[in-house]
Amino acid sequence: MPKVSIHWFRRDLRISDNTALHHAVTSSAQVIPAYIQSQWQNTHPWTGAGKQQFLCNNIEALAKNIETLGSRLIILQGNADEELRRLIRTTHAEAVYTNRDPDPFGKAMEIKVAAVCSELGVAFHTFKDVVLHEAPEVLTGEGKPYRVYTPYSKNWLTLPKTAPWPKVESLGIQHRVTGLPLPRLEQWNLPPCTVQLPEAGERAARKRMKEFIEDKTLVQYGQCRNTPFGKTTSGLSPYLRYGLIGIRELYQCCQQAAEGADTTASSSIHTYIKELAWREFYMAILHSFPEVLETEFNADFRKVPWEGSEKHFEAWKQGRTGFPIVDAGMRQLLATGWMHNRVRMIVSMFLTKDLHVHWRLGENFFMQHLVDGEIASNNGGWQWSAGTGADAAPYFRIQNPWTQTTRYDPNGDYIRQWIPELAKVPAAALQGPPMTSLHPDYPLPIVDHSVERDKTLMRFKQARQS
Ligand SMILES: Cc1cc2nc3c(=O)[nH]c(=O)nc-3n(C[C@H](O)[C@H](O)[C@H](O)COP(=O)(O)OP(=O)(O)OC[C@H]3O[C@@H](n4cnc5c(N)ncnc54)[C@H](O)[C@@H]3O)c2cc1C
């Protein structure tokens, strides 16, 4: 009898450069593609309309791609172990294939699924796919996990990288299994999505990657990446989050672009590749130190008092703090589900160091709104900004939102793009605390940066000494 396998799609919603899918089709006569929707509802702090809609759009795009392979994506809903148990029984599958998830929740489910497969006498094959290097591959000389990015990245860069897997052309004999309709936003009890989402699907991801390389953003990345206005970065994070583009393919395209490039261009490409290593560094931190989801990575700062007010947190969420660069960032997030990295650093440092709001509240808000919301990178970014994380900005280095504006948005283009009330305000007026209101509808700064900075320095110093 021909071998029937199930491919369990998770954060790998594509048919090209998909490790587990490639292995499933090369060793089975029939591959049944399945996606299992979780039962998270809008009450979960990480569930947001934009993010969920983007997921729905990507599942729909995947379903269309699977149709081009002469098959049909099976949608299920519930706990993956129970749903897979049912699917294995109905299809008489002999094997389940999946790509390993780097986060603790995904890993916990893999353990349950492995137990179900073992009970049913079915093979369970898992593969490295989300990253170029999984945590156990990048260790110190003593075989320990790195706690700091720079030595981690030096080691990561020297390791040989796997080439992309070919696009899957067929899933073998057609199956007759039926599943649920494609997921819709209402299933999470969420309001309609008003966010301007990126185009969904594998094709859109590849198009974005090609544009990034061909329009020369990649070769100028070293000089431009800190400018929040315009297309200065890849914009690939939402696609990487849901696996619409394979990391091996992206890496290979960067290497090809580096062939014959001049010194400035190849240095830019190298800088970009090092950003991909940041992504894997934070995944490795979460793998080795899963407690970072609950507490500060740096134990010195577990007693810092976070006494920010609900009122200040609300103003930050709505982009109404009176600090234009902060408000522009928060409004970009609300409108598009994405924010430039430089501004993510500014707004997160502002929330924790100027408003003294706990980083975990900011972390949750980002997870709810970011279409690229990724547990490890988000936690790493928040702990970095709060001064509590791995390779954290030392607590005494507190960015000043006004000087950050002068440095990274000198003409005020980014601020004006996201805060229409300030469209006619001259750039110089956006670079320091205003004496009078900039616009009748725009608030005055809700705090004095230098006063709050001193409070933070005192609190961190005391926490470290206690
Ligand atoms: C407080 C805070 C929260 C963040 N939350 C997330 C998140 O939830 N999801 C997420 O993908 N990134 C997060 N980041 C990292 C970074 O801001 C985004 O990856 C980046 O802005 C995505 O845009 P891009 O694809 O154009 O990046 P590019 O500049 O084009 O970078 C290329 C890729 O490298 C990776 N990368 C770049 N910088 C970082 C970084 N600092 N940490 C980890 N990976 C990085 C991303 O995968 C990104 O797509 C966060 C940063 C901060 C400061």
Image (tube, grey):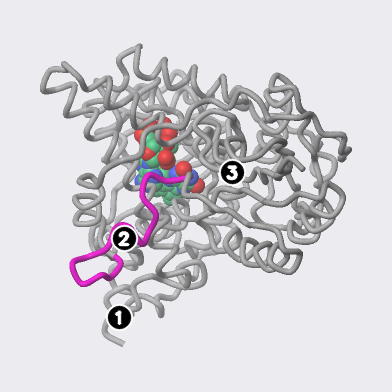
The span from disc 3 to disc 2 (Cα, nearest Å) is: 40 Å
- At label 2, the amino acid type is Arg
User: What secondary structure prevails in the magenta region?
Assistant: loop
440 or 321, nearer to the observer? 321
Q: Residues within 10 Å of mark 1 (few under 14, many from 20)?
A: some
Q: Is residue 340 visible?
A: no
**Which mark is first along the chain, 1 or 2?**
2
429 or 172, nearer to the observer? 172
- At label 1, the amino acid type is Gln
Q: Compared to 331, does 426 lie above or below?
A: above
The circle on residue 433 is: none
Residue 350 placed where, x, y %?
A: 40, 52
The question of residue 135 being in magenta is answered with yes
Q: Which residues are magenta?
A: 130-145
Q: Residue furthest left?
A: 263
To which residue does mark 1 refer?
A: 462
The circle on residue 453 is: 2
Q: Is residue 455 left or right of residue 113?
A: left
**Which mark is first along the chain, 2 or 3?**
3
Please identify the quadrant where the N terminus is shown: top right
**Which mark is first along the chain, 3 or 1?**
3
The span from disc 1 to disc 3 (Cα, nearest Å) is: 42 Å
Which picture quadrant has residue 252?
Answer: top left
Q: Secondary structure at mark 1?
A: helix
- At label 3, the amino acid type is Arg
Q: Residue at x 41, y 26 (%)?
A: 414
